[in-house]
């Protein structure tokens, strides 16, 4: 079966975050919102059907997560990413950010250092500071081709006995890297040497473009498995963030026991009965849909790349290997961050994430979410091209 992403349902007046907050964030509702990382693409029909089927039962009460839901995820992870987890390793979480906060609480104390590799999804550093831990920034290095790599020497120079946890974004948001095995092994070597636990956010792991291959951090070795907390889920892959269901996989019993101590304080419970049905359906039936989606996303990316290449003195797209988030290098426009944001809102009429929100390394950058229907992507490209043409004529 071939899936069609030409059009998508209208999200206006549905309380969709990216639309509802336009006025607050951009000062106007006259922008196409391409910021927050969910898709303007219909959630798969097999997920919606599973929810409808569950609603045929007239009681929606407390429910334990069915074993079959986690079994479906375990099977998916084994088939797609070559890593095996046991049922006892799996814990429910309503979000990766919540899981990250619990990991910070579980594996560090107030005043300890937590490694964050910027530019990165803002909750990485916000979560560290909100827990009164010290932020140890290990900025990524940008190559001459615009791609990013780890700065291992910088990391070596900063680690000390107070460094307890590394927050790994894999694949990386916003720079779109899929880390190679040898890159991850360098991180692993340091973490083993200094007794550092790794929280690996792998929520974008299914959205990887060929020939790149996601390597789960816990799959590197038995030693890696014993120091890793892996956060995974269906939210990004199948546009299901509104179901508020993800999971945490912790193979090491001692780490799991520590994590559960914090986990039980919060009373995460077992989530929603509708989420359980949706979660399992996505993993059971989602393979073909995902493959078609990735082709569609890649086409959208190519459209963006083409228009930016016309104005490469002004704007460049960071080479992407995964995610549906384009990291735009706008430093060629020679605008302040405030003026850059104004350009996108007022001239392009597009609502993007400001690069500076991902850390000071995002100075002069913007993040654009290209996970939209073909029809909407055409609008995005048209608006962007007109705005770039105007600014080019002015300089």
Image (cartoon, rainbow, N blue to C red):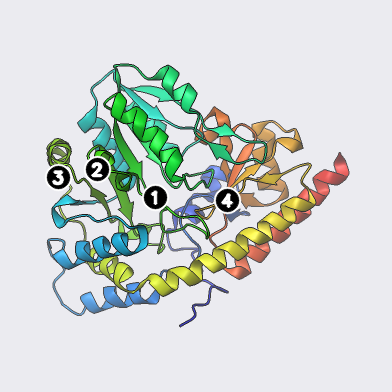
Tally the numbered discs. 4
Contact, mark 1 vs mark 4 (Cβ under 8 Å): no
Which numbered disc flags the more N-terminal residue, 3 or 2?
A: 2
Question: Would you say residue 232 is visible in this rendering?
Answer: yes
Read off the residue under disc 1. Answer: 215
Q: Quadrant of the N terminus?
A: bottom left
Q: Which numbered marker is on residue 267?
A: 3
Which numbered disc flags the more N-terminal residue, 1 or 3?
A: 1
In space, the residues marked 4 and 2 are separated at their CA atoms by: 30 Å
Q: Where is residue 41 in the image (x, y as percent from the top left)?
A: 49, 67
4 or 3: mark nearer the eye? 4
Name above or below for residue 106 compared with residue 292: above
Question: Would you say residue 131 is visible in this rendering?
Answer: no
In space, the residues marked 3 and 2 are separated at their CA atoms by: 31 Å
Q: Where is residue 24 in the image (x, y as percent from the top left)?
A: 52, 44
Read off the residue under disc 2. Answer: 222
Name above or below for residue 233 compared with residue 172: below
332 to the left or right of 211: right
Contact, mark 3 vs mark 2 (Cβ under 8 Å): no
2 or 1: mark nearer the eye? 2
Q: Quadrant of residue 112?
A: top left
Q: Residue at x 61, y 62 (%)?
A: 300
Q: Quadrant of the C terminus?
A: top right
């Amino acid at each position: 079966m071939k899936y069609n992403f030409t059009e998508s349902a209208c999200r206006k007046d549905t309380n969709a975050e990216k639309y509802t907050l336009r006025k607050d964030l951009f000062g106007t509702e006259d922008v196409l919102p391409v910021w927050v990382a969910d898709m303007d693409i219909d959630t798969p029909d097999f997920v919606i059907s599973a929810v409808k089927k569950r609603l045929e039962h007239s009681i929606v009460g407390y429910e334990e997560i069915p074993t079959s839901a986690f079994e479906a995820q375990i099977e998916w992870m084994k088939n797609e990413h070559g890593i095996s987890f046991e049922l006892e390793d799996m814990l429910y979480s309503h979000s990766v950010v919540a899981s990250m906060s619990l990991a910070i609480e579980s594996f560090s104390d107030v005043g300890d250092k937590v490694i964050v590799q910027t530019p990165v999804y803002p909750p990485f550093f916000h979560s560290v500071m909100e827990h009164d831990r010290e932020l140890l920034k290990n900025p990524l290095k940008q190559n001459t081709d615009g791609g990013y790599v780890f700065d291992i020497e910088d990391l070596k120079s900063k680690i000390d006995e107070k460094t307890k946890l590394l927050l790994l974004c894999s694949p990386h948001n916003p720079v779109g890297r899929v880390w190679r095995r040898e890159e991850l092994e360098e991180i692993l070597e340091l973490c083993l040497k200094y007794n550092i636990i790794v929280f690996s956010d792998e929520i974008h792991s299914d959205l990887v473009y060929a020939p790149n291959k996601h390597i789960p951090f816990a799959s590197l070795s038995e030693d890696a498995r014993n120091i890793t907390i892996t956060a995974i889920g269906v939210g990004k892959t199948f546009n299901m963030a509104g179901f508020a269901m993800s999971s945490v996989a912790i193979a090491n019993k001692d780490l799991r026991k520590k994590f559960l101590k914090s986990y039980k304080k919060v009373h995460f419970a077992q989530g929603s009965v509708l989420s359980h049905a949706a979660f399992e359906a996505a993993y059971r039936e989602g393979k073909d849909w995902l493959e078609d989606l990735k082709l569609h996303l890649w086409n959208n990316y190519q459209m963006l790349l083409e228009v930016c290449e016309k104005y490469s003195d002004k704007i460049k797209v960071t080479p992407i290997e995964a995610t549906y988030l384009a990291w735009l290098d706008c430093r060629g426009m020679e605008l302040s961050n405030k003026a850059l944001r104004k350009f996108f809102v007022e001239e392009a009429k597009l609502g993007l994430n400001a690069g500076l929100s991902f850390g000071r390394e995002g100075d002069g950058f913007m993040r654009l979410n290209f996970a939209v229907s073909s029809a909407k992507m055409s609008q995005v490209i048209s608006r962007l091209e007109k705005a770039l043409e105007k600014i080019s004529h002015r300089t």
